[in-house]
Image: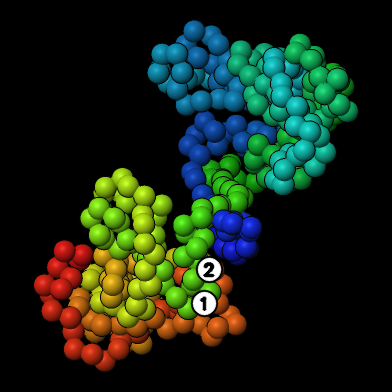
Amino acid sequence: MEGKQDVAEGSEALTSPYVLEYTYRRSLGPVVGRFLTGLREGRIEGVRTASGRVLVPPTEYDPESGAAVGDFVSVGVSGVVQTWSWVSEPRKGQPLDRPFAWALIKLDGADTALLHAVDAPSADAMRSGMRVTVRWRAERVGSIHDIACFVPGDEVQAAEPVAPAEPVRRMKSPVHMDFTIGAGRTLSRFLEGVVQGKLLGRRCPTCAKVYVPPKGACPTCGVPFADEVVVSDTGTVTSFCIVNVPFEGQTMKLPYTYGSVLLDGADIPILHLISGIPADEVRMGLRVKAEWLPEGERQPTLASIRWFAPTGEADAPYESYAEHQ
Ligand SMILES: [Zn+2]
């Protein structure tokens, strides 16, 4: 998993572009594996159910009865558009980089429709009931993308041969989400404070608890927060975990410690890195202080605090943080 966060300042509330992406590697099983192997070889195969329907793309079980499916059958590379939707602004990673249609296509010999792209000159050239034909990709690897797209008409283009290879058993399935998150006014104010090296909390007028980072209203009492309070950047470790497991995108050297830090003056702990002390010496009650990035390097994000490091004070008594651990 990979995340990226660059916070940009807006007029009132901060927003941040955000990318979340990760790649699944999944095994395909005998049915989908054979379907994708067929695509690599320039052939489209479906499966026949007990009632004689031909499913393309194939499923492992008949969706109507749940019974195992039977024989594989080759179907045509041309078919009929059942329904479609026009994409006027294609996004990165879509089958075509120019406007195209997503369409449900019932191939000749199939009883179900396959979702794929149709390369049509404009939306005016699309209609339900039109005939379309596969355009194969020259280099095929055993993926749905081996079908580059469908094109209007019945003119069949032969698939260029590819070198024989093992049946397809696994596939990579990338997930990519690209979006903008809004911090909202309360959190934006907090993040602006972080740039100045201040930790701003908000106090609930009913229960008097101080939340850091603040929310718009008290989650317990449901009333809007009133006073803004500056809380200390020194606090007490109330609980922690030691990370020993490597994962993709990790930036810290193992082992390292993540902890809940109850800042002096706050009633809710924040989560942050605990450093400046061997991982096996971190303990509940440890007194720590924020290690800030130099002023010019601070951004409106909690990463402006490098980590929390021990102050050298005596540990806080258990009773002082017992309800926060
Ligand atoms: Zn409250």
Residue 93 lies left or right of residue 315; in this view the side is right
Query: Which colour style is shown?
Result: rainbow
Residue at which label 1 appears:
196
Residue 291 visible? The answer is yes
Badge 1 crowding class, 10 Å Cα cut-off, few under 14, some 14 to 19, many 20 or more, is: some
Residue 174 lies left or right of residue 186; in this view the side is right
Residue at which label 2 appears:
192
Q: Quadrant of residue 164?
A: top right
User: Is 96 located above or below residue 309 in the figure?
Assistant: above
Question: Which residue sits at x=62%, y=37%?
Answer: 37
Number of the label disc, if any, that sits on residue 169: none
Residue 209 is situated, as x and y percent measured from the top left of the image, at 26, 60
Residue 181 is situated, as x and y percent measured from the top left of the image, at 56, 52
Residue occupying the far top of the picture: 51
Name the kind of residue labelled 1 in the image: Gln
Question: Which residue sits at x=56%, y=72%?
Answer: 299
